[in-house]
Image (cartoon, grey):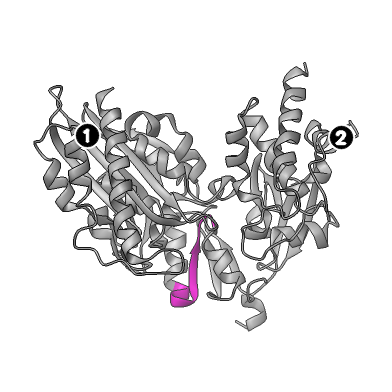
Amino acid sequence: MTAEAEYAAVPITVNVNGIKHDAVVEPRTLLVYFLREHLNLTGTHVGCDTSQCGACTVHLNGRAVKSCTILAVQANGAEVKTIEGLADDDPFHPVQQGFHEKHGLQCGYCTPGMIMTAVHLLETNPNPSDDEIKHALEGNLCRCTGYINIVESIKWAAEKMRKQP
Amino acid sequence: MFPASFGYVAARSVEEALKLMAKHGEEGKLLAGGHSLIPAMKLRLQSPRTLIDLATVPGLRGVRVDENHLVIGALTVHADVAASELVRKHVCGLADAASVIGDLQVRNRGTIGGSIAHADPAADFPVILTALNASFVVQSSTGNRTIAADDFFTDFYTTAMSPNEILTEIRVPIPSSGTGTAYAKLPHPASGYVVVSAGALLTRQASGSCTGARVAIGGLGSGPIRAIATEIELQGKPLTPQIVASAAAKAAEETDPVEDSYASAEYKLHVATVYARMAIEAAVERAKS
């Protein structure tokens, strides 16, 4: 077997934000680069190279995950949701709106990851305490804000989502 | 940045994975959650030529009861171990440990089997599973065998498994009534890995005296270390705060931790006794209810 055949590209099918994509990828393609470069969904960011910062956070089969630490081939057959796919028909998801209302961002680089983690949190815990929010965000780092407004943004969103029918 | 080129195969059964391991030998590596392996590959600390995906094998996830054991599939993610009603009911210390691994995103992908097979000296599961007297079922092409946690973690990143074996199940004895389990951890503030930690299993009679104790300490050596002196001190005694404290004070005896940039050896030796006390106290409280 030639070296090229050993490292053969793999066909995958991934549903991203409701749209099915068929692609052929090198096994070493990280999910974050598949989303950014193959699908042009650049809202998901590459921040740290060491799986710490969470700027790459997306939902994989409904769970918040770090897309820089997942191979695109591991997402074969899965459903992925990125920041671009969050809002459905409204202009903003309540969590996005919360980050606007409560000034939860400065440079914005960590923000899509923060929002994706927050959405997962609120789907499983609709009324989190400040401590629960902070623990949920342990995998998302921000260098600008000091986190206070991020927590306030998520609390604002949680209240809005609890009031929705 | 990103890994060196490699080939990828999605295994559809344990048997197929075993054949692929035999075919690729040292150049093949099993992939479970990938949250230790992929970071290492991105830094090019490891560059296996072929990844054999175990996550595509059905039947390796979930928590169930098998007579007097809790049986956890090796590919069960940490978040599901932490949230499992069965785990929280029978061995709550295991849920404690699962819930403090890494962060929320890591817990959604990292697997209990991957953590155990990787045997990171700063990992959580090896410590609590040693305290719980768990055993691990490993499969090879010639059959299954079961290895006790006490015998499993042999050195840094080294286990008693052979290169031709796959860990498929974790078996945790369901403790008798009057038993409590708990896990207490001092995490490194940046990485979240264990600086020191303690797992405890305590069985207590209604009179308050201890009829069984297993205490394991993490962060002081190449793997989890049983605090035998602490266990001996507790056995048969009333589980008063004073006796727990004096037993916990022995938790780091005979250990020789390495100093690192975060903590000196003296610090680790002392703080291990504090976390041993916290884990034992929490286990005693749970044993009462």
Q: Number of labelled discs? A: 2
**Furthest-bottom residue in view?**
A2
Q: Which label was assigned to residue A92?
A: 2
Q: What residue is shown at x 68% (from left), y 55% (from top)? A: A67
Q: Is residue B238 magenta?
A: no
Q: Chain of mark 2?
A: A
Q: Nearer the viewer, residue B10 or A56?
A: A56
**Which residue lies under the disc numbered 1?**
B241
Residue A83 visible within the image:
yes
Are the residues tagged 2 and 1 within 8 Å (C-beta)? no
How far apart are labels 2 and 1 at the CA level?
54 Å
Q: Nearer the viewer, residue B33 or A145?
A: A145
Task: For the N terminus of chain B, give its image quadrant.
Answer: bottom right
Look at the numbered disc 1 and give the secondary structure of its residue: helix
Q: Quadrant of residue A61?
A: top right
Q: Chain of mark 1?
A: B
Q: What residue is shown at x 23% (from left), y 52% (from top)? A: B251
In the image, B258: left or right of B249? right
In the image, B93: left or right of B24? left
Q: What residue is shown at x 13% (from left), y 31% (from top)? A: B238
- Which stretch did the figure color magenta? B23-33
The image shows residue A103 at horizontal and vertical percentages of: 82, 40
Q: Which label was assigned to residue B179?
A: none
Look at the numbered disc 2 and give the secondary structure of its residue: loop
Q: Above or below — where is B153 with respect to B3?
A: above
Q: Nearer the viewer, residue A5 or B285?
A: B285
Q: Above or below — where is A154 with respect to A6?
A: above
